[in-house]
Structure formats: C-alpha cells, structure tokens
Amino acid sequence: MNEKIIISVKDLVKDYGTFHAVKSISFDVFEGEIFGLLGPNGAGKSTTLEIIETLRQKTSGKIIVDGLDIDSDAASIKKIIGVQLQSSGFYPGLNLIELIKLFAGLYNQPVDPIELLKKVNLEEKAKSKAKELSGGQKQRFSIATTLINKPKIIFLDEPTTGLDPQARRNLWDLIKDIRDNGTTVIITTHYMDEAEQLCDRIAIMDEGKIIKMDSPDKMIDELVATGFERPKQVKAANLEDVFIHLTGHEMRAE
C-alpha cells in the first residue's frame, strides 16, 4: 500500500452551540487504501465526513486533502472527490444513460455512459430508470455516479444497508475493484464483517472522539491477546456463507 497521505485531519472540532459533536480528532488516510470510519449512531462520523467533503463547516482544526487546504481550496477539493448520492436524489423520469450524461454535464466532464455502467455491471440496465432497479443495482449505480469526475477519493456512507447477502458481497467486490484501480475509498458501515473484509485500516469513533485506529487484523489480534474468547465455538462457515453457496454469487435482480 502506498504510504502517501492523501487526507490529513488535525485537531478537528465541530460544535453545535454547547453540544460537542466532534472533539478534537486527528487522523490520516493513505492514498490507495479503503479506510473505514466506524461508530454507533451519534458518534460524529457522518459530521466528520461531511466536513471533509466540504458539505459542512468545521468549528476549528485543519484538514488537507491531496495537498489542498479545506479553508482556502474547497472548490478544488470538490473536483477530486466523489460522494455517494442516495437513490432518492435521482430524477425519476431519466434512464441511467441520461442520468450519467446529466451529472457529466454538471461536472463538465466527458464520460462514456456504457463504459461506466460496465464497471458496475449495469450495462444491461442502461435504458432503465433508477426507480426500476433492485436495491443492489441502485447502490451500484449510486457508486457509479461517484466515479463520473474520475475522483482521487470517494466517500461511501453505509453503502450496503438493506441489501441481501448476495448484493452486499457483490458490492464488496466492486468497492475492492475501485480501490485496486487507484481510488482511495472512505467508508462508513454498521456491519463489522463488512469493515473486516474491506478496510485496510479503521478508526472507531464514540462520543465525538477516535478511541482506536489500526488495521482490523491488528485490532482483533490485540483483543485475542487479552484472553478474550467468544462464548460460542466459531465454525468454519456461517449462515451467510451457506446462503451464498446455495443461491450462487452471480449478479441477479432481487
């Protein structure tokens, strides 16, 4: 993994009146990694990401994104990041090709809609409207829209929530492919198995602070070293593995 720092967050604070949502956190994200920001609801992770995405003002602290200072270069930062949109944000009357062309026009960025849809295995749905897609297909299209401006960094906020096991694992493969093609991925998720499978490193937030940051393997090894044992014997497979084995791993509509 490349050790170049592409996002640097130093002493980030976000207050809402007397409520301290983010309490002086610092962390770095390396170029070309999948970085997970985890935590319970209200931990401050979404606020932190929205500040880095230039969507929310910070109270204090310093953020550098690919050498650009968020205080003076927010417009330039917007050009090199991709932020996942919710499917409800798509115009219902347009098909996928038309939606991609619309976003490409907003970015002033030439793009081949079919090539982009191929990257997310949706070329066969090119003439379909977003509302006609299954849950997994909607999420893959939503991720495709983050790639239109050829970003250096993409932000995915709980991308697999509500998906069935097949759709989740297909989306994991897509996210890994995006990383392997050189894009840095920042992800939030409430699924710990997802974070363990996808993330090179994770930061765990609680009550506005980062309480732990490391690779999933090292965190697990540290816990095991304390003598921790699961109360139930862990089998070599789980029920989700059975489901995938029985129903197949190929893309399919729900």
Image (cartoon, grey):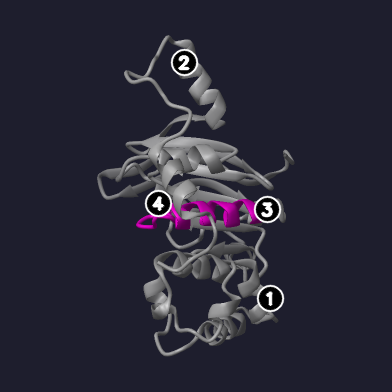
- At horizontal 32% and vertical 41% (from top left) the residue drawn is 40
> Which one is in front in this view, the residue at disc 2 or the one at disc 4?
2
According to the image, label 1 marks what residue?
115
Instruction: Mark 3 vs mark 4: give the one in front.
Output: 4
Residue that carries the numbered disc 3 in the rendered image: 66
Mark closer to the observer (2, 3): 2
Report if the CB atoms under discs 2 and 3 are less than 8 Å apart: no
Quadrant position of the N terminus in the picture: top right
Q: Which amino acid type is marked by label 1?
A: Glu
Q: Is residue 62 visible?
A: yes
Mark 1 or mark 4, which is nearer the start of the sequence?
4
Which numbered disc covers residue 224?
A: 2
Checking the image for residue 46, the label placed there is: 4
Name the image quarter holding residue 191: top left
28 to 234, vertically: above or below: below
Could you tell me which secondary element the residue under label 1 belongs to? helix
Quarter of the figure with the C terminus: bottom left
Q: CA distance from mark 2 to mark 4?
A: 30 Å
Amino acid type of the residue that numbered disc 4 sits on in the rendered structure: Ser
Q: Nearer the viewer, residue 114 or 11?
A: 114
Which mark is nearer the camera, 3 or 1? 1
